[in-house]
Amino acid sequence: MKIDLHNHTTLCNHAEGSPLQYAEKAYEMGCKFYGFSDHNPMKFDEKYRMKFEEMSLYKSMIDEVRSQFSGKMEVLFGYEVDFLPGFMDERVLGAKCDHLIGSVHFLNGWGFDNPEFIGGYKNKDIDQIWSEYFEAITALAKCGKFDIVGHIDLMKVFNFKPKKDMKILATPALQAIKRANLVIELNSAGFRKPVGELYPGDEVLELMAELEIPITFSSDAHSVEQVGQNMEKTVQKAIEFGYKKAAIFKNRDREMIEI
């Protein structure tokens, strides 16, 4: 595991373990570029994210870890930002950091990836919500605020997959991502969710490779044991689809690293 840019801290209120413990585990696994990207503060879903007044604490926590690994492993600092028009805040979007991951976790206020709200799938047309999801991803790409797209096909988390061809659904979003020159993460968290597979799945990953959309790697850890979990399979999947390099960011500038 050389790169892992998307990991959380206890400030999000649904993770455990210290940033130092996460970094130590990553270093033991041979990581060279380890990133924290905790959930952005916003005035929505506040139960599962840091407060605005904790942003400086978050930065200082990661700076402390960075200093301890100086010369051994590069520790990178970012945010995972919910693409949610009307709630995204310039205090986050303009923050001094290495990268911003844009993610869609909500459709019309419905937290579709939260087990608390899984009942919401019962009364919905599966193809319709998948269409709405990728429309949100398209808008995320067009807004010009982010460096990385998080877990591109997250809607499948509980294994509710569309009846319609996934490639047809995903193509406009991927084309928008390509035009916006964004990176898509290969997020190994999918392997530990009910869907039991990488975000993205093979159909989407095949399209990404055809469009030559650059990638990065994430384990999206919310505990020390999840650091680097299934990352070997994730890297092998990238190689299988022809990828030879993956992105990291420093001060929002992209660098491509040999896988």
Image (cartoon, grey):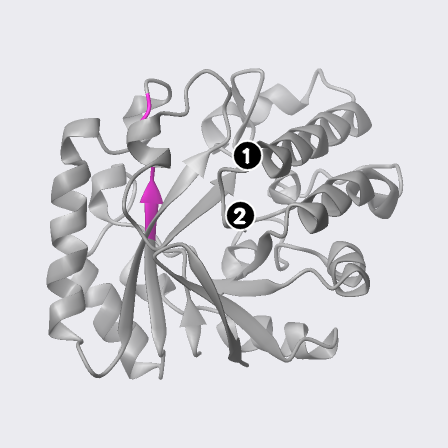
Identity of the residue drawn at 82% across and 38% down: 169
Q: Does the magenta run of residues contain 38? A: yes
Residue 167 image label? none
Left or right: residue 195 compared with residue 102: right
Label 1 neighbourhood size at 10 Å, few (<14), some (14-19), many (20+)?
A: many
**Residue 47 image offset from top left, x and y in percent:** 29, 25
What is the three-letter code of the residue carrying label 2? Answer: Gly
Q: Does the magenta run of residues contain 151? A: no
For the record, the magenta segment spans 37-42
**Residue 250 image offset from top left, x and y in percent:** 36, 62
Residue 104 image label? 1
Secondary-structure class at tag 2: loop
Q: Is residue 16 visible?
A: yes
Q: Is residue 18 visible?
A: no
Residue 150 image label? 2
- Is residue 2 placed above or below 189 in the rendered structure? below
